[in-house]
Structure formats: structure tokens, C-alpha cells
Image (spheres, rainbow, N blue to C red):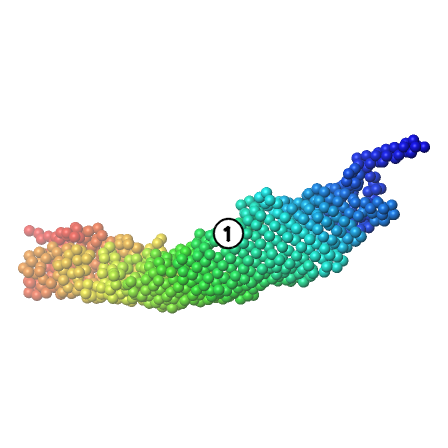
Amino acid sequence: MRRFFYALFAVVVAGLLAAGWYAYNKGFTRKWRGFVATEFRKRGVDLTLRKLTLHPLRGIIAKEVKVYDTNDKRRTMAVIDEMRLVINWANLIQKKTFIDALDLRDTRLSLPIDPNNSRGPKIEVTKLSGRLMLPPQQVYISNFEAELYGIRVSASGRIINPQRIWSAFGPREPKAESKPVDQIAHVLDELRRLDYGGSAPLLDLRFSGDLARPDTVFVEAKLWAERVRRDRWKLESVYLDALYRDQRLALRQLSASDAKGELRLTGSYDPVAKGLEVQIRSTLDPQPTVKAFARIPQLEEFVFYEPPAIDLTVRAALGDSPEVQVIGQVAAKRFALRSVLFDRFDADLVYQGDRWAARGVRLVHQSGEITGDVMQKPDDFRTRLHSTINPEVLAPLLTGPTAEWFKQFEFMDAPDVHIEARGPAPDPDNLWANGVLKLGRSAYRGITAQSASATLRYSDRKLSIDPLRVVRTEGVGEGGLIFDFAHDEVTVQKVRTSLHPQDLIWWIDKQLVNDIAPYRFGKRPPQLLIDGLVHTKGGDSTKLRIDLTAPGGMDYTFIKKELHCPQISAHLLFTKDRLHIDDLQATLFGGRLLGDLDISLLKDKPGHQASIRLEKVDFASLTKLYFNFDSSKGQIDARYDFSGKGDDTRTMRGQGQLIVTDGAVFAIPFLGPLSGILNGIVPGMGDDVARKGSASFNVANGTITTKDFTIEGRGFSMYGAGDLYFLDDAMSFDLRINARGLPGVLLFPVSKLFEYTSTDSLSKPNWRPKVIPRL
């Protein structure tokens, strides 16, 4: 009998060993796996097991477990590579709930980001160890430890009604989950790139609550980390303390420090009310932190030599109509923007959706500072700024046409500017502004001024500078200017100046500089009244009038000779391609010069027309200038109407009349040899002074032509006609000399003998008798 029992025991042991070997190597059958899955389903968990084995030391092991959403089996909630089932054998025999707990040891847990796509990105949890106890309708976690992308996680707690997880934390929205999935995947990718310097951070989680009653859910999380690095970005330490209680998330503290400063965040979020409030205080350098995770081109233009101080409160309502409000202060010490170095910036900020404001703005530069306020409301933008900064230092901040226009200025002294602007938006096309400008030593287009002051107004892309007062060493300019940027026009409003026109015209339109260059004024500038409009790009609208009075005189080049007028006045009218000068009045060689001129301003079509009158001009001074002799006497009255092309004298065409009174006409070179001929006829007649000389003449191709040349002396008369080639130093001229008084009566029968001609040099003529007597 004993042998029978031994044999039976051996058979039972052998059977158990065989069954254990089979269960260990081959696993339990599908029936048993279904039996275990049914047990979990009773607890509200739907899962499948690929393999269920028996380990001789650890017990029953479930491998490759997939957990599904109870309400939608297509949604995979977790994948567990291995877990040990703690079996209550008594309950199993009594067909009661027999799984008391799950033991995990160095287990890998995979949580799909998108439960609908089990093959998509996953949250990988490794080295997961701990016991998961499963009382009825509960989950109790004891001393769970795991590793999540380099972070050591410690968790413990109890959850009642775990199957209600979706109803506790919000409804599912499968149609709108793609974007959150991408965001979570991006966060996980960033976690993978973090390096913790060999010392893994610690995340401690504590939780409890009944998911059927969300108001009882409690979650506490604390994180400690040191030497966190991502590429070149490095934090010395990070500490997080967060709490979820009463359906509110409280960020009790988030602090992070680097070598220069510290960031502190506190706040709360109410998922039910969808309300958020966060307090941010930072002295971190924002650039390394931002560069580590994102690229913001505007921030890359800054260089902070000392970290800015940021103190902000953010409130947000994240309902159907999200609203965000930001209130706080920003302060920065030494920093650079596009190579411009500033000493300090301070501002109080307010932002609320389509409303924002910056108050108490203060930007300090070594050359001065800008202070003011800026505000934007719906269709209402306002700003008030006061600046003592030298604008030249801000030039790198400008771009496009504005930068090119600004390059024309130079400020030796920092100006004082006060500006107030308003409009629907900070858009130059719709902005209105006014201001006051005070300049010290400065220059525009290379022309300097000692000081200037102006009142500014801007609207409809028009900048009005009126009144404007400019002080230079030689005088003062006052009036108004309007820059019409939309039409490329400058309107000059009754500008009165005692400044040099050659300098002043650079400020109005540099294209007119060459047009007024021939009119040269000495040390004493003229008095100008300028009024009209100039198109800065050569348009048809140019119509600029200048009334000129020059008590100090003016120099002008006429027929390649320099004329000096001690006093002159005129009215100048500039149009697109013409300069018209009327009512010209000047003193010249003791007499008067009067005239009107019309001059082409087109380089490819030069030309001019003029009507000039001389009254009682010293004849000797005029002949000295143009013929290089000064022994003639008398006064000249003349009128000359002519036209020409630029400086080419040969193209001059004209006609005129002249009268010389009480003049020593024989001192003129081409008449000089006739003095000896007259002395031969009647001694002393060649030294006589003509009472009157006159002629009408035409000018063409460098030739003066006259048909009624007349000289009346006390003892003779001369009548002539011919051509004087004044550009070629040649002549073809005939003269008849008549003696007056008794010599004239006696010589009348032989008057034909006193006709002379010359076809030689104009400067050295050779007069010979026109009729040679026969012997």
C-alpha cells in the first residue's frame, strides 16, 4: 500500500512538473488566457494576453499584454511587456475574483499617444517596478518606480473606479486629436534631447481619489533636477511642485536657474471654468532658452549683456471665446538691438486680446533717452514720445525707403523731439501725428545748420513742417515745408531766408542745384522768398517761385565773361523743365541792367531766351571786360533780345539796338586806326569825343551784323555797315566819314574819298580807302 502511495505521489509530482514545464515553456492555453482576460474585464479593464506562463519562482506571468479602452476596443491604452499575477487561490477555487494584485519588475510600459493608432508614437516607460493591487473597483499602487526618458519616477496612491478615467478628466474628442498628438510627440522628442549630466532627475507622484467623483481626485507631483542641458543651453537646477485638487491644477512653484538668473512660475488652472492664471518672474537670459526649443527671428536681433527682469501676471479664459490678459513690467539693462547698444529699457505692459499698452516706456542710450506711452485699442492707436537720443544711432533699426531718406541727415548735437500720434493702427498710411522739433548743430544732405526748430504735423502720408526756423552762420530761414510722400512732392510755404541759395536748394530739391549754380553770391547772401511746389522725381507738378533781392550783389557768366552786379533783384519761376526769370533789375557798371529770361533745365535740350536792357552803363567798363581796353568813355544804353543753347555762344541768335553818348569811340580797337585817318584829314579830329553813337544789330553764328552804324562827333559823322566776327577775330565792315561844319562844306565834292573798308582782324584791323583815286 505504501508503495502504491509512493507511486501515486511520484506520478502526481511528475504530472505537476510536466504541467509546470509545459506552462513555463509553452504557456497556458487560450482558454486560460481568456479566463484571465475575463477576470480583468470584471474589474473594468479590457485586455488581451499573447502568452500566460508559469515561472517556478515568480508564479504566473502574463506577457505582451495590451490594454484597450473598455468602450472602444480599437483604442489601445497601454502595452505591457510582462507582469506577474498575484492569485488568490481560495477565491479561484470558489470561482470568485481571484487576482489580488499585479507585480511589475523591470517592466517596459508602452502608452500610445493616439489610442486609435497603436502603431503611432508612444510614451515609453522603462524599468517599471512595483505592486499594483486590485481590490474591487480600485487600483492601489505601492512603491512604483520607473524611468521616463531619463527621469526617475516614483509613484504611489489609490484610485477608486479607475474605469471612469475618461469621464473624470474630460470627454474624448477623437476627431480633433491629431493636433494634440503632434504636440505631445514634439514634447517627447524634446525630452529625449535633454541631458542631465549623469544624475537623473527625480519625479515624485502621489495620488488618490474616486474617479466617479472628480472633486475627490488628488494628484501631487514634485520634480528635482540639476545640470539640465540641451545642446548649448544649460540650467543649474529645476524644481517643480504641482498639485491637482478639487478639480483645480495649482502650480505651487516652478523654479529654474542658470549661471545668470532665475525663473519662477506660480499659478493655477481650473478645467471646469477653463480659467488660467500664472505669475512669471524671470531674470534668465531669454535667448539661450528660446533658441534651445524654438526660433524667433525678432529675438535673435537682440543681445543681452545682462539678463532682463520680467514680472508678468497672465490670466486667460479658455472657453468658446478665449481671452488672455497680461499685466506686468519688463526691465532690461545693457543690451543691443541690431548693433545699437542701449543702457536700459523699462516699461509697464498691459495686453488683453485686441488691446495692449506700454506705459512708462523709458529707453536709455548714452546719447539721450526716449520716454513715453503707447496704446492700442480697436481702431484706436495712440502714442506720446519724447526723445533726446541722437537719431543717427537708431539708423540700423530702419529699413527700406525710410532708411535711405534718413541717411541724408547728420546730427552733431542730439535733437529734442516731442511727438504725439494717433490713428486706427500704427500704419503710416492712416496715422496722424504732431510734434515739436528742436535741433542743435545738424546737417541735411551735407549742408549744415547751427540750430533749427519746427512744429511737425503728419497725416495722409504728408509731413508738414510749419513754422520752421533754421539758423546758419550767414543768416536765418523761416517758413514752412510739406513733404507729400504719396505724390513725391515738396511744398514750400513762404520761406524767407537770408541763407546761401546754393546750400538752401539742397534741402528742397538737389536736382535744382546745377540749375542755380551760375548765379553766384558773395559772402553776403541774398534775401529770398520761396513759395511753390517741387516734384522730387521730376514730375510735371513742379512750380516753385523765388523772389530774390541781393543787396550784396551777384556774379554771373555771360558770353564767357564774369559780370558783377553790386545789387540785383528778380523773380524766378522753376517748372519741370524751365526757369523763367522776370523783372530782373540790377546795377551794372554804374548803370542799370533790366531783363527777362527763359532758360531750359533739360540737359538733353539746352536753350534759353532773354531780353536784356542796359541803361546808362559805363561804356569804358563794358569795353574793358569784353574787349580788354578801358580808354573809351561815355555811357551806353542798349536792348538785346536773344536766344541760345547753353554755353555755346555760337548758337546765340538775337537782335538789338545800342546808343553810346559822350564816348571815346576811337579807343575801341576795330575803330582805333580811323583816329589817324581823321587827324590826316583835319588835324585833331581823330581825338574828338563822339557825342552819340548808335546802331541796330543782329547776332548769329558768332557774327554781329549792322546796317546803320552811326557815330556823331562835334567835327565829323561816321556811317557804317558790315559784319563783326567776334568769335573768330575777323571783320568785314565799311565806313564813310563826313566832316561837319566848314570842313564838311569844303570837302563835300571829294566825300567819296573818305569811305573805308576792312576785312582783316577784328582786334587789329587794317582800314583802307574803299575808292582809290586815279592819277
Give the percent coordinates (x, y) of residue 228.
57, 47
Q: Residue furthest left?
A: 683
Query: Disc count in the image?
Result: 1
Q: Quadrant of residue 472?
A: bottom left
Residue in the picture at 22% in, 52% down:
727
Give the secondary structure at mark 1: loop
Q: Could you tell whether 611 is left or right of 162 in the image?
A: left
Give the percent coordinates (x, y) of residue 429.
49, 62
Residue in the picture at 23% in, 57% down:
562
Give the percent coordinates (x, y) of residue 101.
78, 47
Give the percent coordinates (x, y) of residue 166.
74, 55
Q: Quarter of the image for the N terminus: give it.
A: top right
Under mark 1, the amino acid is: Lys
Mark 1 — residue?
Answer: 260
Q: Could you tell whether 518 is left or right of 388 in the image?
A: left
Q: Could you tell whether 571 is left or right of 75 in the image?
A: left
Can residue 50 be spotted in the picture? no
Residue in the picture at 84% in, 34% down:
18
Q: Residues within 10 Å of mark 1 (few under 14, many from 20)?
A: few
Can residue 86 be spotted in the picture? yes
In the foreground, 74 or 532:
74
In the foreground, 579 or 129:
129
Residue in the picture at 12% in, 52% down:
768
